[in-house]
Image (spheres, grey):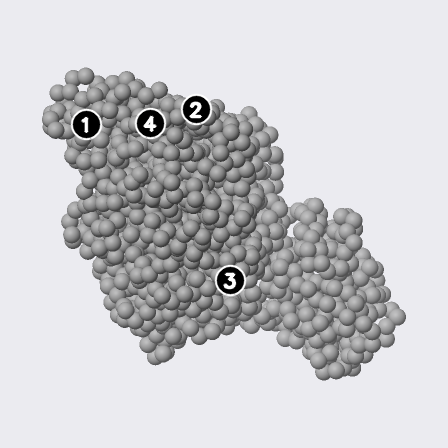
């Protein structure tokens, strides 16, 4: 590949030949035939990104945008076409603005959680976070991927807290979605309220939806405004342990209905063990002592009468729990609430918690409604039995989203990356379980890898429509070809 | 008045469609949320008050002409007045009910009549009743009652039976019971017997203004001659005509519905119950007793503007929005009867659903009339009541016809029937 | 009849003879005299929308699909509307078939646990709310009130209203959608397309719900939406509203966990500060500057009229002369209404305290006169059910909103006084109601959780009075010029005119192009043009779907 044009755009220091692909931490990467990229390019700003994309259109070179650091688990950043160029945005890592009044932060794609959280805290803000993301995970990418956040009450729609974006479409057009025309570059704009607070539009198309969960196949996002929440003056976390998942479902529904609790989710003992353990050999013993199922509820006090708020909500949650024959407790065997709270408010330490047990981990995740989750767990376990995969190893994470209308459910299947038999077994289980869950009406709204085929082959109209939109925003199909239904 | 007098309203209609629903504040379910039978059945916008404003506008501007459809649009209006109530939750300068009446008058004046109405018109013209029966038989319902007849005696309180009660053998007992109850309570009450004439209410709501005026003037004159000071009736249509329409033509009598009288008499202890009637009932507010039964105040005035463009009236115009209709007296009466449990339907009082009999609809659109009644029966059944009680013979007979057609078991009573049973 | 006979006959076969009409008088009841979304300009201009070719009442998605396919075959434009209370619901071109969606009015499902409802286009806010309340849920209702179609507001227009703050605006609450596309293909969006139910409108992958609507919907110009799911939220109140009172002064006495306040502030800055603190704290169930739509000078007097069944507009002057009314009017100059709802007694107790704290910090106060029980209970019912929005037109039968100042509240509060005083000067000319200039109404929180505001300045006039109409238009032109001079852009007074001109028909292309090219991002309309080419190749909608061709 002639790299001279790229060097012209980003400079010598921004072009890398023959970059190594990430190690395969997840099996789904094996199911996409990886093609080694020929070049990795690191743009510094949106103008360079735009020039790269225009060049790609001229030369019909596939581009694969990446913002986060390694490991990449889902295969969306693995090229499927020869001579792809990785567009590495991790160098565009400025936090452009944090505005307390409007509770907005403006960030570039390379900004990670570990970078952003302390800066927000200084301004009395925080962000609705996913569960212990990798420290080098791009905040923007996480939001674009529609990774579930732990606080469903702040999710007014599934893309929250993502707001306005600056996008370079696959055609090379630069565009601002939402109220992104207010870039907030002038201080007086903030005083006057000319701020990028809106997500939808502008106009009658919802542009940011087209780059959401698109795996970089429509365009490259170079800037985003993100809605923040206040950093609470005080917090408390509680556990609601249960022997059976069914026992806590209705209780969770009541919390969601009343919007009590801030971070709320359900883990099984294995998943919690993976989160808590700092050493691999702790995991087995933790699994033995932790309750089979644990609902986690944290309460935040905000910045006005925080202690009173926490006291009131704690009592109300206690009353609710009692109605369902449950208890809320600050300690369970194996874990203190304070310890877990510390963990979930930060990105994961190394090794990434999902990889702690065996070094490799296959995720199966999907969307459903909370009431259907026990059925999916049963299906997963049945498949595991058939494939002789140890059930105690399966991590289960249930995350209500969109204020309780939906629920993200996730199964973690740890495997030893050095053990071929485990790899094969896990791969077979992954395939089989994915299909079974799909047949059972699990909604694979983020269709990575084999899920894409499953989903698009059964929803012909969505496939046709999505392709037409692709033709509009990426007419030469340069953006991450081979993903989704493209 | 003329249809053109509503030109301003035609432009000022909000086009909000509030006229198609009961007042939203009162909605308790999806099932019983609608108020206007004609649009609920026909669905086209033109079948609502809002739509009729637009149709009226189109006709008066010469943008369209008469057709079968236009006749249907106009004549399927029951003139129940529910649109008027809902509109006036917010609007103070529109009169949708007056407008739809004027629309009917215009069609009749222009010869756009319905053949199906002709029999009733002829009956009124020839026999002074709506029932197609000989005038000479009008008083027979009271033959076995000892009552002063106003043809030969001066009586201050007149019981006006009405066409329906006079001739419908299924209903005559109710009329007898009403007048007997009042007599028993010491009211010196007489009747016109065969000299009674139709109140004209029905023909008015069908669009025949001249025929109404003729009947009304005749009645007013007759009463004056007979020294009548008070008219009592059990027919809500008649009640409305006497109370709301006659004053414009110079009538000065006091007007009561039987239930008002009964309510007062029961509270004064002049009627005592002897038996219990263990029944769960629900009460249907007749349009002409409820929302159209408000006190009438004569008004002459003009429109004026304040604050630039706020439309008001000089002098202040009385407002008829159903607020002060006769709702509590019938309920008081029902609650006073030992054993009777009253449960309410969802659409009651000023936002009650029409029985489907009025406006000439029963005569010209029997299927639609039946449907309207059956909707009300369904609503009554949803309360769990075993009987539907009302205070109008038109409502009662329409409900009874619907029940018979549908094979339902719900009983229908006039409120007087229950009082009579208990006494 | 402008439709060929065979076409009319085929349509009749689709919907049944009862459900189609081309009678001119009926068609005239499906026309609108228009300017903006909700009002009319009177008879003095030829502003009525074109007469439709026919009006149909489809009863099912299958019928809608058959109609749309037929329209494609014969290249006939079509336009659907549910309640016809918006200029957007009417054709802009001659020979357009009108679809009245009224018959498709079922609430198909209320999923109590997962808090959503599946509805057809004819379902209005009031009936869904009534049904939802039976199971302890509530629905967001758009600012135009509960007489409006939820589906229409959610899929096809805007969907902002007083309950944005807690309930989310319709943009946010729209889940799965069933859409008969302009070609007649049926598109089931989100989880529905994957046959996984209605609960999710996004995905799979990039969310094609983004074609159905952006900040705004397609205003009836891109096919017909036949079903959708709408997210609901908690209603910790009685299963039916225990309404009391004599019409129109209905009121509701709700349990102690429901409180309605009108609060006012010493400055616009304090007003904005309070909005931010409310959002930061996450309290409030509804928050709206509602009654100010009557005008700064008239609002309290109007509240007195509306809460007294013996009063009419004729009592207004007398009330305005009352010193106590004057005092309260002055007191509530910079106000808004808020409803606090506690999910539990402890919750409401905390919210009350926190709200008092916010008032203390911002120097705000509760307008005590609005706390009188009959007024409080009237306000509560009014805001929860939002069934009095015909009051927008109470004075003379017409209104339109001007300015708008959509954006962060600091933006709106910076400029609202200037817009108010500008209008107040124009009010003196007599063409519009003299209401004190500031007649701005809008949500405290344009979206879930807050963050933005809208300042629709109500301009009330008489559509039957030529001078009033002419004067109003002159004022709107002046308002637009002011907005452009100040950099606020074109205000709400002209939002309709980029689609439809004063002759009721599509704004000429040259004018539309000028407007679109002058927008901050013309490419928005170019992309919309490409989407229209892709999904509406026969161009059977109208210019309410705004496009710019290359």
| Of B32 and A52, the residue lying toward us | A52
Look at the numbered disc 2 and give the secondary structure of its residue.
helix
Dots 4 and 1 on the same chain: yes
Which numbered disc, 4 or 2, marks the residue closer to the eye? 2
Q: Which residue is mark 1?
A: A41
| First of labels 1, 3 by sequence position | 1
Q: Which residue is mark 2?
A: A421
Q: Residues within 10 Å of mark 4 (few under 14, many from 20)?
A: some
In which chain is the residue bearing label 3?
A
Relative placement, left or right, of B38 versus A231 is: right
| First of labels 3, 2 by sequence position | 3
Dots 4 and 2 on the same chain: yes
Which numbered disc, 1 or 3, marks the residue closer to the eye? 3
Q: Position of residue A435 (x, y in %)?
A: 50, 28
Q: Which mark is residue A345?
A: none
Which numbered disc, 2 or 1, marks the residue closer to the eye? 2
Q: Is residue B109 visible?
A: no
Q: Which mark is residue A24?
A: 4
| First of labels 2, 1 by sequence position | 1
């Amino acid at each position: 590949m002639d790299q001279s044009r790229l060097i012209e755009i980003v400079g010598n220091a921004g072009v890398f030949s023959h970059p190594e692909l990430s190690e395969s931490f997840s099996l789904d990467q094996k199911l996409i035939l990886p093609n080694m990229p020929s070049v990795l390019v690191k743009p510094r700003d949106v103008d360079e990104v735009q020039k790269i994309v225009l060049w790609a259109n001229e030369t019909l070179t596939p581009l694969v945008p990446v913002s986060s650091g390694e490991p990449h688990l889902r295969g969306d950043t693995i090229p499927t076409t020869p001579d792809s160029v990785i567009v590495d945005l991790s160098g565009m890592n400025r936090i452009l603005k944090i505005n307390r009044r409007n509770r907005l932060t403006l960030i570039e794609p390379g900004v990670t959680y570990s970078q952003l959280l302390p800066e927000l805290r200084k301004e009395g803000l925080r962000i609705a976070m996913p569960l212990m993301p990798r420290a080098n995970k791009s905040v923007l990418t996480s939001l674009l991927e529609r990774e579930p956040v732990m606080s469903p009450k702040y999710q007014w729609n599934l893309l929250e807290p993502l707001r306005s974006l600056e996008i370079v479409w696959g055609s090379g057009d630069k565009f601002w979605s939402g109220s992104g025309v207010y870039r907030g570059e002038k201080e007086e704009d903030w005083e006057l309220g000319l701020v990028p607070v809106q997500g939808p539009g502008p106009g009658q198309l919802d542009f940011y939806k087209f780059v959401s969960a698109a795996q970089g196949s429509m365009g490259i996002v170079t800037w985003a405004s993100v809605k923040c929440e206040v950093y609470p003056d005080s917090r408390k976390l509680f556990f609601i342990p249960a022997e059976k998942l069914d026992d806590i479902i209705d209780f969770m529904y009541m919390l969601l209905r009343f919007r009590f609790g801030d971070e709320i989710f359900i883990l099984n003992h294995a998943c919690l063990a993976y989160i808590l353990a700092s050493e691999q050999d702790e995991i087995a013993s933790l699994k033995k002592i932790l309750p089979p199922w644990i609902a986690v509820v944290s309460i935040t006090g905000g910045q006005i009468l925080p202690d009173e708020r926490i006291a009131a909500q704690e009592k109300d949650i206690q009353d609710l729990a009692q109605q369902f024959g449950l208890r809320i407790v600050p300690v369970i065997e194996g874990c203190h609430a304070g310890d877990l709270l510390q963990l979930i408010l930060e990105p994961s330490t190394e090794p990434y918690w999902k990889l702690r047990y065996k070094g490799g981990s296959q995720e199966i995740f999907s969307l459903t409604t909370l009431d259907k989750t026990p059925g999916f767990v049963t299906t997963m376990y049945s498949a595991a039995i058939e494939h002789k995969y140890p059930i105690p190893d399966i991590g289960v994470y249930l995350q209500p989203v969109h204020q309780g209308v939906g629920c993200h459910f996730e199964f973690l299947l740890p495997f030893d990356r050095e053990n071929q038999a485990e790899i094969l077994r896990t791969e077979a289980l992954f395939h089989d379980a994915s299909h079974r869950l799909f047949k059972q009406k699990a909604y694979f709204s983020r269709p990575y890898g084999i899920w894409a085929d499953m989903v698009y082959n059964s929803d012909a109209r969505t496939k046709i429509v999505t392709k037409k939109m692709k033709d509009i925003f990426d007419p030469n199909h340069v953006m991450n070809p081979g993903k989704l239904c493209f | 008045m003329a249809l053109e007098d509503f030109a301003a309203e035609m432009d000022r209609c909000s086009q909000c469609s509030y006229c198609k629903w009961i007042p939203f504040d009162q909605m308790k379910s999806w099932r019983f949320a609608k108020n206007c039978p004609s649009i609920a059945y026909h669905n086209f916008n033109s079948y609502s008050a809002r739509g009729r404003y637009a149709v009226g506008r189109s006709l008066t501007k010469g943008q369209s002409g008469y057709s079968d459809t236009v006749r249907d649009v106009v004549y399927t209006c029951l003139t129940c007045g529910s649109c008027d109530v809902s509109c006036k939750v917010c609007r103070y300068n529109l009169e949708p009910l007056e407008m739809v009446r004027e629309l009917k008058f215009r069609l009749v004046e222009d010869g756009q009549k319905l053949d199906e109405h002709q029999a009733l018109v002829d009956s009124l013209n020839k026999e002074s009743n709506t029932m197609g029966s000989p005038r000479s038989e009008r008083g027979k319902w009271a033959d076995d009652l000892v009552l002063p007849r106003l043809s030969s005696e001066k009586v201050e309180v007149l019981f006006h039976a009405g066409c329906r009660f006079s001739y419908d053998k299924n209903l005559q007992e109710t009329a007898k019971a009403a007048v007997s109850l009042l007599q028993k309570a010491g009211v010196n009450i007489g009747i016109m017997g065969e000299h009674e004439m139709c109140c004209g209410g029905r023909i008015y709501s069908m669009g025949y203004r001249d025929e109404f005026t003729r009947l009304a003037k005749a009645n007013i004159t007759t009463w004056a001659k007979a020294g009548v000071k008070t008219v009592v009736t059990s027919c809500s249509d008649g009640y409305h005509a006497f109370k709301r329409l006659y004053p414009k033509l110079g009538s000065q009598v006091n007007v009561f519905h039987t239930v008002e009288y009964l309510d007062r008499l029961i509270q004064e202890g002049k009627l005592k119950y002897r038996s219990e009637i263990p029944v769960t009932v629900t009460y249907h507010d007749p349009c002409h007793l409820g929302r159209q039964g408000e006190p009438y105040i004569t008004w002459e005035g003009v429109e004026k503007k304040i604050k630039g463009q706020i439309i008001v009236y000089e002098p202040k115009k009385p407002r008829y929005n159903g607020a002060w209709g006769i709702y509590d007296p019938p309920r008081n009466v029902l609650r006073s009867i030992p054993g009777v449990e009253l449960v309410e339907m969802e659409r009651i009082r000023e936002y009650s659903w029409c029985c489907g009999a009025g406006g000439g609809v029963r005569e010209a659109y029997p299927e639609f009339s039946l449907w309207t009644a059956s909707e009300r029966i369904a609503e009554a059944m949803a309360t769990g009541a075993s009987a539907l009680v009302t205070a109008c013979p038109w409502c009662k007979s329409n409900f009874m016809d619907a029940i018979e057609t549908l094979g339902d078991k719900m009983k229908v009573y006039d409120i007087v029937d229950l009082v009579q049973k208990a006494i | 009849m402008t439709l060929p006979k065979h076409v009319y006959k085929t349509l009749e076969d689709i919907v049944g003879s009862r459900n189609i009409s081309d009678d001119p008088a009926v068609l005239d009841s499906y026309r609108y005299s228009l300017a903006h979304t909700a009002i009319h300009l009177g008879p003095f201009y030829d502003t009525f929308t074109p007469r439709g070719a026919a009006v149909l009442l489809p009863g099912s998605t299958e019928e809608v699909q058959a109609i749309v396919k037929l329209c494609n075959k014969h290249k006939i434009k079509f336009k659907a509307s549910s309640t016809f209370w918006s200029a957007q619901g009417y054709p802009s071109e001659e020979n357009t078939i009108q679809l009245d969606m009224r018959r498709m009015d079922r609430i198909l499902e209320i999923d109590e646990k997962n808090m959503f409802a599946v509805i057809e286009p004819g379902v209005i806010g009031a009936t869904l709310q009534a049904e939802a309340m039976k199971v302890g849920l509530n629905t967001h209702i758009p600012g135009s009130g509960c007489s409006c179609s939820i589906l229409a507001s959610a899929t096809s227009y805007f969907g902002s209203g007083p309950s944005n703050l807690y309930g989310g605006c319709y943009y946010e609450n729209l889940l799965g959608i069933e859409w008969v596309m302009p070609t007649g293909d049926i598109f089931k969006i989100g989880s529905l397309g994957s046959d996984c139910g209605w609960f999710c409108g996004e995905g799979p992958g990039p969310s094609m719900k983004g074609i159905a609507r952006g900040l705004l919907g397609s205003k009836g110009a891109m096919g017909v939406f036949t079903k959708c799911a709408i997210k609901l939220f908690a209603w910790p109140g009685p299963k039916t509203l225990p309404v009391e009172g004599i019409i129109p002064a209905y009121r509701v006495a709700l349990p102690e966990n429901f409180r309605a306040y009108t609060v006012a502030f010493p400055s616009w800055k304090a007003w904005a500060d309070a909005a931010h603190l409310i959002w930061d704290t996450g309290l409030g169930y509804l928050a709206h500057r509602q009654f100010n739509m009557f005008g700064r000078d008239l609002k309290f007097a109007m509240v007195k009229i509306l809460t007294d069944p013996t009063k009419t507009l004729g009592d207004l002057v007398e009330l305005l002369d009352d010193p106590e009314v004057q005092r309260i009017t002055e007191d509530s100059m910079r106000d808004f209404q808020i409803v606090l709802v506690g999910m539990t007694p402890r919750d409401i107790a905390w919210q009350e305290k926190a709200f008092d704290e916010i008032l203390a910090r911002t120097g705000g106060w509760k307008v005590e006169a609005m706390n009188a029980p009959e007024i409080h209970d009237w306000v509560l019912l009014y805001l929860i059910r939002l069934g009095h929005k015909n009051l927008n037109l109470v004075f003379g039968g017409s209104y339109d909103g001007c300015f708008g100042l959509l954006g962060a509240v600091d933006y709106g509060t910076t400029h609202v006084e200037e817009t108010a005083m500008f209008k107040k000067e124009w009010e003196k000319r007599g063409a519009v109601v003299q209401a004190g200039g500031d007649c701005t109404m809008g949500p405290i929180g344009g979206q879930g959780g807050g963050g933005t505001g809208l300042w629709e300045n109500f301009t009330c006039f008489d559509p039957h009075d030529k001078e009033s109409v002419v004067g109003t238009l002159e004022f709107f032109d002046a308002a637009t010029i002011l907005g452009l001079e100040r950099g606020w852009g074109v205000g709400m007074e002209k939002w309709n005119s980029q689609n439809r001109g004063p002759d009721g028909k599509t704004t000429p292309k040259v004018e539309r192009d000028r407007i679109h090219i002058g927008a901050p991002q013309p490419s928005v309309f170019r992309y919309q043009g490409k989407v229209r080419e892709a999904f509406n190749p026969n161009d059977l909608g109208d210019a309410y779907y705004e496009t710019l061709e290359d």
